Image (tube, helix red, strand yellow):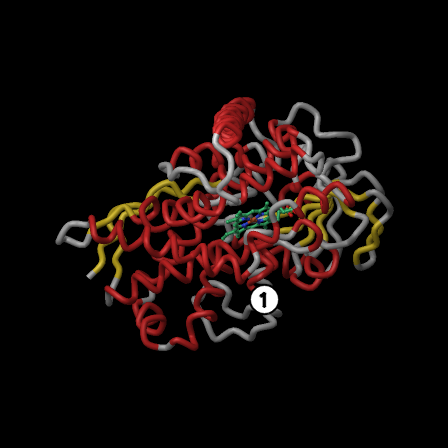
């Protein structure tokens, strides 16, 4: 294996090629095999091996925003959130909501998600056909988050669409149109977050999370801007990745009827199956970080101020850890950790327990009632070189 020097690196990862965006796996397999560290012509580096991603993506000298600043990226809208802050400020913001998302709390919130899924299935006609992305992926998670925050339930789909718009601007080289639409997505979600905060300030006192976070702002533990961005993330994107996870699970179950049966009858297999679903669903394909000091990876010294992209989507199919990566194999060893799909290090996903609990609760409802799932028509996938999500999946249960 060797480091790849420019310009070959750019050909190895054709970020804007529609085929690459749809199914990047052959390109990933090639870099995993021959070029574990790729240098691109703009000086950035790409890391793909599972061992390297596990070791370096959490390196404490890496940060989420370039030392040169974020420019006019639409993601400047999240500069005051956990996503794009570091150190003490990051921990301070995170503390205002993380204890509400522990595995134990998530277990409680997941009951709301299960009720929401049951209600959707009760509304389903005798043909067993349902728009499953919205009804079983998005809405149960959105309803659970409404409960956590202590706010009214709302249709979750407009938030998923808005988040998808923002995610397109996280691609390697977003077009002017993608940037414009990402600004629209953020505009919509910030307005909604502002409205929720105003409404709660007018009617405080239920002791749920939004109440608590407003208290934190009133006591000076959060700035108003940090409050607004945190609520935008929690309310605006709580159901985004869980929607993709559920859509992906249903497609996996449709393609592998034996796995649906195993989930139904073998309680011990459930966590393993969910892990394999998560490995394959991969809403976040990559993490982008910036060096603040020289960083040595293998025999390469990466200079400060360099963008480094860790490709989770490649690491999670590294043949040294995941043989036959295309196969749905829920017997993979535990150390072949699917948790990588939730990121790692200081910015690892704080919603992991929530997403897992919601997924478990909804699938439990499905296997309680049905034996089989089939996909009806074509799912609507929304993809970039950085993210994979869904905006439509119809299925038939029997
Ligand atoms: C299948 C579901 C999910 C997946 C695969 C997922 C994946 C990820 C990943 C990969 C990151 C790291 C991003 C980075 O380092 O740049 C992340 C961060 C984050 N996620 Fe999730 N996520 C999911 C669900 C959720 C949910 C349901 C919530 C909210 C309840 C949530 C809230 C967050 C937040 C706030 C961060 C930023 C944490 C920080 O920077 O400290 N996620 N997520």
Whether residue 250 is visible, yes or no, is yes
Q: Which residue is mark 1?
A: 337
Query: Looking at the image, which residue sits at the far left?
Result: 126
Image spot of residue 367 (x, y percent): 30, 66
Count of numbered tags: 1
Name the quadrant of the C terminus.
Answer: bottom left
Between 316 and 247, the one lying in front of the other is 247
**Residue placed most toward the observer, 79 or 296:** 79
Q: Can the viewer see residue 181? A: no
Q: Is residue 13 above or below residue 277?
A: above
**Element under disc 1:** loop
Residue at (52%, 24%) from the top-left corner? Answer: 187
Question: For this rendering, which residue is in front, 373 or 121?
Answer: 121
Examine the image and state in which quarter residue 382 appears: top left
**Position of residue 130 in the picture relative to residue 222 (left or right):** left
User: Seen in the image, is 125 located left or right of residue 263?
Assistant: left
Q: Is residue 294 above or below residue 262?
A: above
In this rendering, is residue 80 above or below 392?
above
Of all residues shown, which one is farthest toward the right? 294
Residue in the picture at 48% in, 42% down = 206
- Residue 211, quarter of picture: top right
Q: Position of residue 48 (x, y in %)?
A: 65, 55
Q: Position of residue 182 (x, y in %)?
A: 53, 28
Location of residue 156 in the rendering, given as x and y in whole percent from the top left corner: 39, 39
Q: Residues within 10 Å of mark 1 (few under 14, many from 20)?
A: some
Which part of the image, by quadrant, shows the N terminus?
bottom right
């Amino acid at each position: 294996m060797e480091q790849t020097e420019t310009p070959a690196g750019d050909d190895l990862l054709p970020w804007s090629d529609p085929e690459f965006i749809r199914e990047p796996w052959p390109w990933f397999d090639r870099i995993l095999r021959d070029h574990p560290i790729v240098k691109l012509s703009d000086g950035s580096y790409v890391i793909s091996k599972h061992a390297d991603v596990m070791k370096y993506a959490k390196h404490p000298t890496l940060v989420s925003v370039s030392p040169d600043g974020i420019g006019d990226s639409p993601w400047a809208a999240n500069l005051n959130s956990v996503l794009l802050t570091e150190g003490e400020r990051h921990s301070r913001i995170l503390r205002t909501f993380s204890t509400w998302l522990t595995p134990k709390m998530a277990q409680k919130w997941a009951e709301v998600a299960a009720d929401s899924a049951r209600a959707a299935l009760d509304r389903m006609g005798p043909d067993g056909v349902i728009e499953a992305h919205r009804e079983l992926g998005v809405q149960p998670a959105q309803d659970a988050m409404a409960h956590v925050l202590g706010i009214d339930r709302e249709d979750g789909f407009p938030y998923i669409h808005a988040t998808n718009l923002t995610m397109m601007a996280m691609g390697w080289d977003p077009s002017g149109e993608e940037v414009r639409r990402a600004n629209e997505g953020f505009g919509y979600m910030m307005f909604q977050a502002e409205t929720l905060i105003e409404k709660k300030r007018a009617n405080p006192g239920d002791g749920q999370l939004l109440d608590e976070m407003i208290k934190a702002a009133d006591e000076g533990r959060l700035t108003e801007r940090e409050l607004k961005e945190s609520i935008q993330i929690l309310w605006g994107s709580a159901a985004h990745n869980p929607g993709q996870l559920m859509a992906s699970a249903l497609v996996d179950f449709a393609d592998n009827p034996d796995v649906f049966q195993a989930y139904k009858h073998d309680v011990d297999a459930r966590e393993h199956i969910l892990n394999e679903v998560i490995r394959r669903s991969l809403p976040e394909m990559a993490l982008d970080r910036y060096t603040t000091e020289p960083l040595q990876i293998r025999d390469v010294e990466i200079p400060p101020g360099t963008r480094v992209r860790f490709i989770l989507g490649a690491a999670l199919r590294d043949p040294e850890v995941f043989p036959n990566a295309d196969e749905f194999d829920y017997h993979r060893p535990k150390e072949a950790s699917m948790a990588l799909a939730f990121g790692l290090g200081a910015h690892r996903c704080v919603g992991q327990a929530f997403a897992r609990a919601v997924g478990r609760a909804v699938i439990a409802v499905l296997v309680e009632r049905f034996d089989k799932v089939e996909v009806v028509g074509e799912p609507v996938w929304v993809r970039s070189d950085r993210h994979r999500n869904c905006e439509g999946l119809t299925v038939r249960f029997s």
